[in-house]
Every structure is written in C-alpha cells, then in structure tokens.
Image (spheres, grey):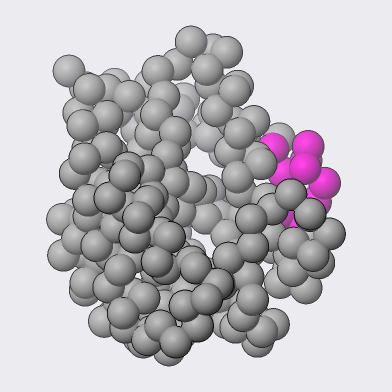
C-alpha cells in the first residue's frame, strides 16, 4: 500500500488555522478522500494530558526547556500512536501544528536555539517530516486583535504572552520557511477567511496533483 500524505498547518496565534482546517477537512471529506484530522499538542489521550499541562494559564512558572521537552514528548507519542499508522494505511493526515511550531516558538521566540530544539525534535520524529506545510502568515497585531474579539476561543498560556513574544514567533517562522522552503507554502492570513481558504486549497490541490502525477 502506498504511503499517505502528511499535511501540517502552522502559524502564529490568531492566524485562523483551525477555522480554515475545518473547511479543508470538509472539502476533502466531500471528495471522498480518506483523511485523519488531528492536532498538536494532543490528538491522543496521553498527548492531550501533556497539552493540558503546557497550555494551562496557571503554569506561568514553567521553564522554557521544560516546555520544549514536553512538546517533543507529546509529539513523539502522537506520531507513533496516530500519525504513522494513518500514513502507513494510505490516509491523508491533516495536523494542526507540528515540529515547525517548536522551532518558531521555543527555538526562536524563547531563545533556546534552533539547533537545540531541532535536535530534540528530530530525535522524537525520526525523520518523519510533513510532505506539505501550509504556513498562515499573520501580522501579530491582527492576530492578537482577533483573539481579543473572539469570545468563543479557548485562551491558553501562549495567548497571554506580550506582543514582543509574538513578533519573535513570526521571525522564527520566517527562519523555518527559509530552511524548509521545499515543503512550506506561505498563505497570507491577514485576508478575509474565504480568501485564506481559497489560497490554502490552491496550494493543497497543486500538491495533490503533483503527487498523483509522480505515482
């Protein structure tokens, strides 16, 4: 059986990743495509418990290295328990965040270093990088404003970071894009939702077409 396709969605806080991912999931499902939707940290019981620890708004004393290690631990368990089995069965996996988040948030914004964070995450994923990453590029000012206006959104510990932190996250993602440009497609997330969805689907369909041609 052919290996499935691993697609991740990345972006700063308030980029609209989850909302657009909902629309992508529905579109692919309507096409009869076999997909698995998941998220990080989380996706499985063990990783969801780690998520509760990482994102708890009361855990303000959490050390940055502890945070990075917890993300990597959740990622490892999620990968072996859910992502890899789905890929091995030929399914498309849609994942809200993956290794790029750790590089941007902990590696750059927290100042732990790209190489250091990349090392612990490469140990965790054993070479299983995404086939395609949709990076929703959002102006941090706009992203935080959206969060403030969205009364339905779950507010987590990272949302409460100061603006300077979110500006560094954006810088981190730009560095990730430069490193992994062969798989990362930047989508302008400052646009209205429908325009963001349209651009994301064009990138996804282009990738699906190329994969089909190669097969």
Place of residue 142 in the rendered image (x, y in percent of width and height, measured from the top left): 79, 66
Tally of numbered discs: 0
Asked whether 51 falls inside the magenta stretch, the response is no
Instruction: Please tell me whether residue 146 is drawn above or below residue 81 in the rendered image.
Output: below
**Quarter assignment of residue 145:** bottom right
Check the picture and name the quadrant holding the C terminus: top left
Q: Is residue 107 left or right of residue 192?
A: left
Q: On the rendered structure, is 203 left or right of 147?
A: left
Tell me the quadrant of the picture where the N terminus can be found.
top left
User: Residue 164, image x and y in percent?
Assistant: 65, 87
Verify whether residue 195 appears in magenta: yes
Question: Considering only vertical position in the picture, is 32 above or below 118?
Answer: above
Q: Is residue 143 left or right of residue 210?
A: right
Q: Is residue 90 visible?
A: yes
Q: Please name whichever residue, 161 or 186, is drawn nearer the observer in this view of the structure.
A: 161
| In the image, residue 155 above or below residue 171 | above
Q: Is residue 175 visible?
A: no
**Residue 27 versus residue 157: which sits nearer the camera?**
157
Give the magenta-colored segment's residue range.
Answer: 186-197
* Residue 154 in the figure: left or right of residue 78: right
Give the residue at x 71% y 72%: 140
Q: Residue at x 48, y 10 (%)?
A: 32
Which residue occupies 36% across, 76% down?
67
Q: Position of residue 129 (x, y in %)?
A: 29, 51
The residue sitting at 21% across, 40% down in the picture is: 81
Q: Residue 188: give x, y in percent of width and height.
A: 70, 54
Q: Residue furthest front?
A: 58
């Amino acid at each position: 059986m052919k290996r499935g396709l691993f697609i991740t969605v990345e972006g700063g806080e308030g980029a609209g990743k989850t909302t657009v991912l909902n629309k992508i999931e529905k579109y692919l499902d309507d096409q009869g495509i076999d997909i698995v939707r998941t998220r990080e940290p989380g996706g499985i019981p063990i990783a969801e418990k780690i998520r509760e620890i990482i994102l708890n708004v009361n855990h303000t004393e959490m050390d940055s290295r502890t945070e990075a290690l917890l993300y990597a631990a959740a990622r490892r368990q999620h990968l072996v328990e859910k992502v890899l089995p789905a890929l091995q069965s030929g399914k498309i996996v849609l994942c809200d965040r993956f290794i790029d988040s750790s590089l941007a948030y902990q590696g750059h914004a927290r100042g732990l270093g790209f190489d250091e964070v990349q090392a612990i995450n490469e140990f965790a994923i054993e070479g299983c990088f995404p086939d395609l990453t949709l990076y929703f590029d959002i102006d941090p000012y706009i992203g935080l404003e959206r969060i403030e206006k969205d009364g339905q959104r779950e507010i987590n510990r990272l949302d409460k970071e100061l603006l300077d932190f979110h500006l560094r996250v954006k810088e981190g993602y730009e560095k990730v894009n430069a490193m992994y440009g062969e798989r990362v497609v930047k989508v302008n997330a400052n646009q209205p939702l429908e325009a963001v969805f349209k651009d994301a689907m064009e990138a996804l369909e282009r990738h699906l077409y190329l994969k089909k041609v190669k097969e």
